[in-house]
Amino acid sequence: METRKVQLSGGTTFTVSLPKQWAQEHGIEAGSVLSLHANGDGSLLVEASANPAGTEHETTVDVATDSDTALRQRIRALHAVGFDTVTLLDPTGHSDHRRAVVEEAVAELSGFELLSASDSRIQLTNLIDAENVDVRKSALRLRLLMLAMHRDAVDAVLEDDADLADRVVRRDSEADKLFAMVTRHFRRALTNLHEVEKLAYSRAELFEYYYASRQFERVADHAVKIAQFVSDPDAAVPGAFADRLDDIGADARKVVDTAADVILSDAGIEAAHSALDRYDALDEEISALDRELYAHEDPAEAYVVGLLLDSLRRTGEYGVNIAAIAVQQTVREGLD
């Protein structure tokens, strides 16, 4: 670290000299324009070019040898890391099937649209600017969606309701899109100060929203896993366990919901501790029921209930993850 003494120029302007080596490495000379970003923590970031982070992120990718799965993953990754314009190049020509794969992948991502297509090039573009995005509200929407999916999934299994289970599975794409949007803007904020300014949240806050959303998305995935038991004729849940499974499912969701209140609703550290205590009680209840399954007369039924308990325990564990970040948040805010 180098230090510089602040000088007073013209009686009204404070000036400080730049390190010569740094200036030379970045081609800075008299008349160069620098970008200055004042942060709330007392730091001042100096960028070498006038508007480096504000320029559009573009890339061209050769996907000629990509499998369908690799192509989908590549599009998701390009969206997540923050590209605004993406050209998918295939010199051999994009087949109708490959175009359909691209369209399906794009449909799963908020903001990305297919702009144009030719024999060898497919161009994707982002239509949503950070100024029109509220990461916290997106996380809140994902939270509500996840809780509804999980509740409906448990109900569908206990009531053997195939239509309700199907609705849970279909809503997973909505959860994925919300999480993809939060991920995109969080990732962009890591390297783009203009993104941070547009989003109007600090990087610490954006990380907390991203991390909580990641846990919500995982709970939604388990909701789908639970709902899919309905389509298995051999996965019946014994009536003797139904009420307890319903209660355990509600308790697991409460762990997640209570912990999320700290990050998304400023509930305070007491809520985080409450979520952790709730999980301890939930874990004991699941373990007790799990032990009972060893003596259950029907091994197939015991196996199904055991799988459901695993998903419900995982749900509670994701709530614990959120609570841990929530405790860190309250500590950080106490130090600010």
Image: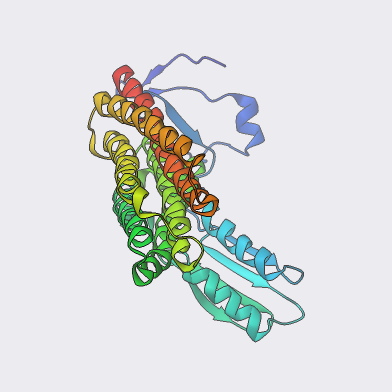
- The part of the image, by quadrant, that contains residue 173 is bottom left
Image point 44% across, 33% down: which residue?
Answer: 287
Q: Look at the image and tell me in which quarter the N terminus lies.
A: top right
Above or below, comparing residue 95 to residue 204 in the picture: below
Q: Quadrant of residue 68?
A: bottom right
Do we see residue 17 in this rendering? yes
The one of 238 and 245 positioned closer to us in this rendering:
238
Say which residue appears at 58% left-offset and 37% top-offset.
28
Name the one closer to the observer, 311 or 97: 311
- The residue lying at 29 percent from left, 53 percent from top is 144
Q: Horizontal and vertical percent for residue 176?
A: 45, 59
Q: Nearer the viewer, residue 244 or 268?
A: 244
Q: Residue furthest front?
A: 297
Instruction: Please provide percent x and percent y for residue 333.
Output: 31, 23
- In depth, the one of 123 and 3 nearer the eye is 123
- Say if 34 sits above or below 170 in the image: above
Relative to 282, 307 lies left or right:
right
When the figure is inspected, residue 100 is found, relative to residue 248, above or below; the finding is below
Residue 99 picture location, percent across and down: 61, 80
Q: Position of residue 230 (x, y in %)?
A: 44, 65
